Image (cartoon, rainbow, N blue to C red):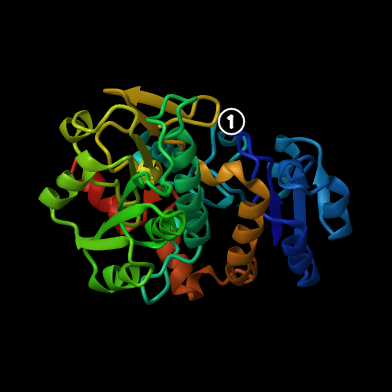
Amino acid sequence: MDIGVPREIKPLEGRVGLVPDACSELVASGHSVFVESGAGLQSGYTDDQYRAAGASLRDSAAELYESAELIVKVKEPVEGDLLHLHREHILFSYLHLAAAPELTQRLLDIGLTAIAFETVQDDAGFLPLLAPMSDIAGKLAVQLGTGLLHAPPGGKGLLLGGAPGAERGHVVVIGAGVAGGASVCVAAALGAQVTVFDRKRERLEAMREVGNNVTALYAWPDLIEAAVVDADLVIGAVLIPGTKAPHVVSAAQVSRMSAGSVIVDISVDQGGCIETTRPTDYRTPTYRVNDVVHLAVTNLPGAVPKTASQALSAALSPFLLPLAEGKLEELAALQRGINLSAGELRHPALLSASESK
């Protein structure tokens, strides 16, 4: 199969769909890989490294999309990508269509097959292609949130881990999946007092093992509210695969948080789980509501493109070869990842949302 890796054009998105080693694996299996010139530069990979891996370089997006049948990219297509997509393409990327009705309609009109990384799901319910970026996003949420609590950017001047004779910060994490779990581990390691909420007992048990400074609670609304209004840093990490995230923190609750507190909503790709969330990017990553700092960057792992690209390619490897060999119909995990095909919605969550309108 002819596989194309375009350069990401979302603002300040430096990740690349495939690193050279992943391209080499595909070429060794008899497939042709085309890479748009400069696609890997922000992740630390030169065009020469892709050539050495056996890939063919294309000078423009138009040439790249024309050369390939399977398009492997990181983020959802924006206008510059949509111009080149056509019915015969298979698009394999993060899409988050539940929060993007206009993009959904554009892709339906094009008529291609779109497989979303975030909805590829194995028989146990695990999301193997979402997990690596969720892990990175969860870690970054604490790192970036910690910086925003400092006084120079307008935070409350707090060190999360405290110091001898000084109080430690309170971090509230809503959702204890891969992203939320990563946030809990980093915040706990920094010495913060951490409260984490979820509705699955096994996740809460795992969080209790992280450290004595972690309190794991069932996600009752009144308990979430009490914790949020007391928090210095709130991290939203709620995920229902393929579905728009529910609001678990209201605007009224945000208004009761102390000035200079910080909210990082990792769920923003799926619409956000905090009512006051609105999407941002790294050009202007933050905004304030009632003097509470909000960070809601839709491509959070884009800040660490080298790490993120390596992790993504490693996760993609078991799925790319079967997909390139035309075995899409044989792999249940990939079948679950199909969001739309031939002008029709395929994913159950998208179908349900469409029928409820």
Label 1 CA crowd tier, 10 Å (few <14, some 14–19, many 20+):
few
User: Dividing the picture into quarters, in which one does residue 121 lie?
Assistant: bottom left
Give above or below for 176 relative to 108.
below
Q: Which residue is most to the left?
A: 222
Q: Which residue is mark 1?
A: 11
Find residue 237 and report its horizontal and vertical position in percent.
Answer: 35, 51
- Name the residue nearer the viewer: 311 or 128: 311
Which quadrant holds the N terminus?
Answer: bottom right
Q: Please, which residue is most extreme toward the front here?
A: 165
Say whether residue 56 is visible. Answer: yes
Does the image show residue 239? Answer: no
Q: Position of residue 162 (x, y in %)?
A: 41, 46
Residue 143 as seen in the image, left or right of residue 216: right
Q: Amino acid at mark 1?
A: Pro
Q: Tell me where residue 310 sits by quadrant.
A: bottom right
Q: Position of residue 145 (x, y in %)?
A: 44, 40
Residue at 78% x, 40% y is: 38
- Residue 247 position (above or below residue 127): above
Viewed as shown, does residue 242 lie left or right of 185?
A: left
